[in-house]
Amino acid sequence: AQSVTQPDIHITVSEGASLELRCNYSYGATPYLFWYVQSPGQGLQLLLKYFSGDTLVQGIKGFEAEFKRSQSSFNLRKPSVHWSDAAEYFCAVGAIGGYSTLTFGKGTMLLVSP
Amino acid sequence: SAVISQKPSRDICQRGTSLTIQCQVDSQVTMMFWYRQQPGQSLTLIATANQGSEATYESGFVIDKFPISRPNLTFSTLTVSNMSPEDSSIYLCAFRGWNTEAFFGQGTRLTVV
């Protein structure tokens, strides 16, 4: 069975500091990996995705993520956090090819301090 | 990318009543998904809806409680029936194109009083 683990429920980062959100997955085949962001009262917005190619993926809003197969990880990073980045972040995994649903982690709430 | 519109965006309902949530996609999609997001929790898949067939429900969700319609390739509804306060959640519709990410509606924030 597939699963996603986000070990950090909450993270607080000072504005301007760097950020890394952790994601580990369990999947029986080559995974399709995603990071989504959800601001309060909003739906989910895709930040970035990966299933092949360069293991360092660039996304929107200055985010990037690195796929490490040996560690079954897909951590999200940003070099300098802005107050507007405060939101909940979800890592997800799905099948490559097809229309199947995604499995989501429990999410990490990012708080940004001044 | 396709646009998916979900309504209502929020509602406050009396216990024992039902609420129907609608999702409209601006292009034809094969499968649509309905998720529940309880307060402070992640997304839990309720069911998968294909056009022309009955929805497939995940463990813990039943058709009598969450009937779903999928009359065509651009539209789906989820009804939350005989509501109780435990049904207070955000409900999200979504679809996934062939080998793409999932696209989500804006969500329906339901409060049952």
Image (cartoon, coloured by chain):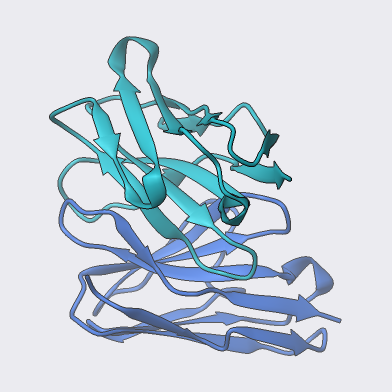
Vertical comparison of B61 with A21: above or below: below
A63 lies left or right of B82:
left
Q: Residue at x 30, y 24 (%)?
A: A28
Q: Give me the residue at 30% from left, 78% from top.
A: B3
Residue B61 image-quadrant placement: bottom right
- Of B51 and A60, the residue lying toward us: A60
Residue found at x 82% / y 84%: B15
Task: Using the image as rendered, state which of residue B5 and residue B75 is in the foreground.
Answer: B5
Count of numbered marks = 0
Front one among B44 and B62: B44
Quadrant the N terminus of chain A occupies: top left
Q: Position of residue B2 (x, y in %)?
A: 24, 74
- In the image, is B54 to the left or to the right of B1? right
Residue A49 pos. (x, y %):
29, 43
Q: Quadrant of residue B33?
A: bottom left
Q: Is residue A63 visible?
A: yes
> Residue at 18% across / 79% down in the picture?
B28
Residue B94, compared with residue A14, is above or below; it is below
Name the image quarter holding residue B17.
bottom right
Q: Position of residue A10 (x, y in %)?
A: 70, 37
Is residue A102 something that shows in the picture? no
**Residue B65, relative to residue A71: is it above or below?**
below
**In the picture shown, does residue B15 fall above or below A62?**
below
Residue lying furthest top: A70
Colour of chain B, in one word, is blue
Which part of the image, by quadrant, shows the C terminus of chain A? top right
Q: Position of residue B62 (x, y in %)?
A: 56, 65
Chain A: give its colour. Answer: cyan
- B13 on left or right of A89: right
